[in-house]
Amino acid sequence: MKKIFADTWAWYAMVDKSDIDHATAESINKQLLDEGYIFVTTNYVLSESVTLMRYKLSHAVTVKFWT
C-alpha cells in the first residue's frame, strides 16, 4: 500500500472549485488514486482544513467534506 501525506492546501484546493489550484489538485488526486495511493493526514491538518473551509466557503461545504 502506497501512502501520501495530504496537507491543508490539498484538501482545500480539492473542495474549492474557485481556488486557483483546484484543477491541478483534481488532476493529481486522480493520478495518485489510479496509481494505488491512499491519502494520510493528521488531526491537526484536518482541523485546520475544516476551519479554513468553514470561514472561506460555507458550513454546508465543510460538513460535506467532513462526511
Image (cartoon, helix red, strand yellow):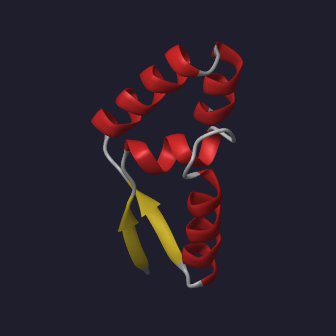
Tell me residue 57's x, y (percent): 61, 21
Image: 3 above or below 63: below
Count the labels in the image.
0
The residue drawn where x is 39% and y is 72% is 3
Name the residue furthest bottom: 35
Of 29 and 36, the residue lying toward us: 29
Find residue 46 and report its image quarter: top left
The location of residue 10, given as percent across then percent down, is 46, 51
Q: Does 57 sit above or below residue 9?
A: above
Taking the image as shown, residue 8 lies to the left or right of residue 60, namely: left
Quadrant for residue 32, please give it.
bottom right
Percent of width and height locating residue 45: 33, 38
Identify which residue is drawn at 51% across, 40% down: 12
- Image point (59%, 41%), residue name: 19
Left or right: 41 as drawn, with respect to 16: left
Q: Residue at x 65, y 58 (%)?
A: 23
Image quadrant for the C terminus? top right
Position of the N terminus, as image quadrant, is: bottom left
- Residue 35 percent coordinates (x, y): 56, 85
User: Residue 25, relative to residue 18: is it above or below?
Assistant: below
Q: Quadrant of residue 26?
A: bottom right
> In this rendering, is residue 29 above or below 55?
below
